[in-house]
Amino acid sequence: SAVISQKPSRDICQRGTSLTIQCQVDSQVTMMFWYRQQPGQSLTLIATANQGSEATYESGFVIDKFPISRPNLTFSTLTVSNMSPEDSSIYLCSVELAGSLSSYNEQFFGPGTRLTVL
Amino acid sequence: KQEVTQIPAALSVPEGENLVLNCSFTDSAIYNLQWFRQDPGKGLTSLLLIQSSQREQTSGRLNASLDKSSGRSTLYIAASQPGDSATYLCAAGSYGQNFVFGPGTRLSVLP
């Protein structure tokens, strides 16, 4: 398994500002992911954070709004830029670990960052 | 493109009941199916992972089954407790796609 921490755990921000969320994993992993969970909704994948290259964004998400860094195999950041109240969500990072006997991967999640934009 | 649905959307049961949560997926070419638990405002906790070659997995009072041919997975919770109250999500890992999550089932176990 993997132990994942996120900072901050929650924040209240003003419209137009930016917030950077940090994700730290206790082991080296290839694949890290950032998700958004809007109130009462399921998870939506924002992007896959690739070490040594640019993140891969899903449809509807752009780098200017959600810049991502992945400086090494245990750490990533997601920035929510120029925030509006619609960005109020829980933001979660996750990692995918390969099974010991096969390539069937299991996902583990951090505790999430609860963001409220006023 | 994989789509995952879950029924019921919400469930309320008295303590001690056995219950079943359902998860359906449209593309049977999955390599695994994972069940998670999420407490309000928190992250996801992995409960069970079923590989595509398996039919079920068990952990304590939880049992998850997988039927790839019918595109279904079920999570069985035995002797439910108030502490089981949470949202339960399933996610399908498909070849060439990222994990796709269902909308979740919100479970309330009443004392």
Image (tube, rainbow, N blue to C red):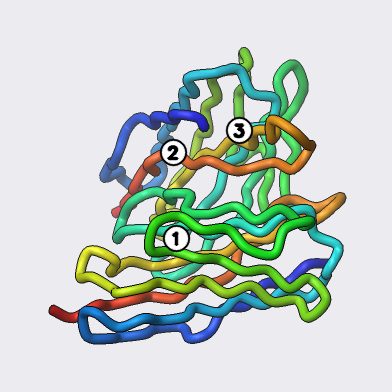
| Residue A14 position within the rendered picture, expressed as x and y whole percent measured from the top left | 31, 45
- Is A13 in front, or is A99? A99
Q: Are marks 3 and 2 in contact (CB under 8 Å)?
A: no
Name the residue carrying label 1.
Answer: A86
Quarter the C terminus of chain B occupies: bottom left
Dot 2: chain letter: A
Q: Residue at x 24, y 77 (%)?
A: B109
* A61 displayed left or right of A76: right
Measure the C-alpha gap from mark 3 to mark 2: 19 Å
Whether callout 1 and callout 2 share a subunit is answered: yes
Above or below: residue B1 compared with residue B44: below
The outermost residue toward the left is B111
Q: Quadrant of residue B78?
A: bottom left
Q: Residue at x 78, y 53 (%)?
A: B31
| Residue A1 position within the rendered picture, expressed as x and y whole percent measured from the top left | 52, 32
Q: Quadrant of residue A7?
A: top left
Name the residue carrying label 3.
Answer: A67
